[in-house]
Image (cartoon, helix red, strand yellow):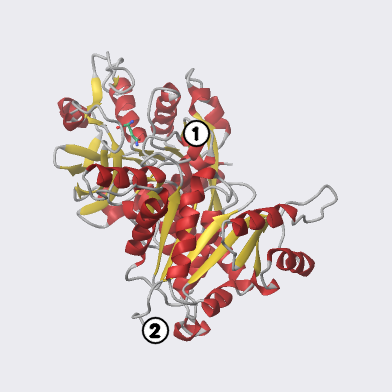
Amino acid sequence: MPKPDSSLNSKFIFVTGGVMSGLGKGVTAASVGRLLSNAGFTVTAVKIDPYLNVDAGTMNPYQHGEVYVLKDGAEVDLDLGNYERFLGIEMTSDHNITTGKVYQHVINQERTGDYLGKTVQIIPHITDDIKRRIRAVAEGHDVCIVEVGGTVGDIESMPFLEALRQLSHEESNNCVLFLHVTLIPHSKNEEPKTKPTQHSVKELRSIGIQPDLIVGRSATSLDDEVRQKIALFCDVPAEAVFSNPDLEDIYHLPMSLEEEALDEYVMERLNLLENSLPIPDRDTTWRQSVTAPKNEEVNIALVGKYGLEDAYISVYEALKHAGISHGVQVNTLWVQSEILDDGDTSFLSKLELDGIVIPGGFGSRGTPGKINAIRYARESGVPYLGLCLGFQLAVVEYARNVLNLKDAHSSEIHPETSNPVIDLLPDQHDIDELGGTMRLGELETHIQENSLAHSLYGSNSCLERHRHRYEVNPNYIDSLEEFGLKFTGKSGPRMEILEVPGHPYFFGTQFHPEFTSRPTNPSPPFLGLVHAALKHSSTKNNKK
Ligand code: GLN
């Protein structure tokens, strides 16, 4: 495939949001990136989170959704997961800029005397630092997409928008585009309303930013009349107004934007067209994967503390990826673990499950329910995948019900237990700061030959991302193994993978394989689960 000229200077697409948050701005931005990457360009992304937290590590998933973990151990907003999945790239802490990070750096510099004699101000010192960070990420890439979290008009995002405004003036012509994602609600009589968009664009213009493209999020595609109206009021050409309608799968958004020729418009405006791959040569792997037919279906329960999709988004997506690869529709059923706390698992039996996943988590709420779900999976032969806390609780369940250590527990949840089968990592004892202090990021696991893990990964080792403070207590490993639980993945003295031989699929990982799963490159433990779930479903159907 011919490669476009890689000596281009970076181009920037700045993505802002209007009317309300949660519009799918990140998915829109990531889809634009996917299209440019299909056309042969190297694309990277920056997510700006205007909150004061230095990172998302200490934030509650209930409010902010999942904390996504990057290769370098950075704990970031879930939008970075979308960028990694859509663009197939690996990002680092530098790709997530927060107010906390910027101010911490500028204030530290002030303290060390770097600004000696000067008054340190938002403009230029904070804005300069923001621009420096964006340029550093963009370097070496054809296109850098920068998404500003929140909505235009938020006090917190002001310095960031000002920095983007300045950057757009500093870069040469045809280097920067502002893309505004906004909501087009429908009135009671189904009429699309553009007034909120007009207001948010007015807000944007009052701070000196004129959007170049507008993407309207609405139930259906925007018709010509609506496009014309937005064009007129917001001062953009009608061909620069695009739709982001409700779709059956977010992975179809790149194709939906492509149908409206958003990619051509963006490339033309950024002067990239002549370096883009001709349409027949563009990469279609994404399209082929996400539209592959699904001939069968399986039901998999995700048993977590929160009955909230955003809190476990990477797990949900990883299940989908494994489904794509097996040609299977994975129906993810959200189960709040607390409802299983009393030990009655009839709720699970009624769901006709083909698999159970217990994701990562912290704290004690709903853990009895999770342990009951694990016991149910182990005893009834329903395929099980435990991730991080789901791995640790599988050890607890095994210790209690197979080794008969009735009070076995994780010392995180029950510090007084006389059998702490899961205990604090040795290097976690003297830590008193909570931000960024866990065992974090990509680490290598050595995999035992002739194990399920080995057949899934097809290798003697794997690199996966971590986020935990507790681990399997080394004092219990021998007895657990004597009673049949096998630790087939290890990282030095640490247990990383567990299996129960003889069970159709009972697999747990101390790491989080969901963070490296991609639609075009699914995660091995998830592939294994969906494979086993398929088998489970066909035996179930045969019995009927
Ligand atoms: N709370 C557990 C620990 O700190 C598990 C963490 C997780 O599931 N990410 O080890």
- For the point 55% across and 37% down, which residue is it? 352
276 and 231: which is toward the camera = 231
Q: Secondary structure at mark 2?
A: loop
Q: Quadrant of the N terminus?
A: bottom left
Query: Of discs 1 and 2, which sits in the foreground?
Result: 1
Q: Quadrant of ligand 1?
A: top left
Determine whether, in the image, residue 25 is placed left or right of residue 58: right
Quadrant of the drawing holding the C terminus: top right
**Residue at mark 1 to residue at mark 2: CA–CA distance:** 45 Å
Task: In this rendered view, identify the residue nearer to me: 353 or 87.
Answer: 87
In the depicted structure, whether residue 204 falls above or below residue 486: below
Residue 156 at x, y = what percent? 49, 44
Residue 178 % position (x, y): 54, 65
**Residue drawn at point x = 51 percent, y = 46 percent:** 537
Ligand 1 contact, mark 1 (Cβ < 8 Å): no
Q: Earlier in the sequence, mark 1 or mark 2?
A: 2
Check disc 1 and give the amino acid type. Answer: Tyr
Residue under circle 2?
1
Q: Which mark is residue 263?
A: none
Disc 2 residue type (three-letter): Met
Is residue 300 in view?
no
User: What x and y, as percent, mark residue 267?
Assistant: 52, 77
Instruction: Residue 341 in the image: state x and y as whole percent.
Output: 47, 20
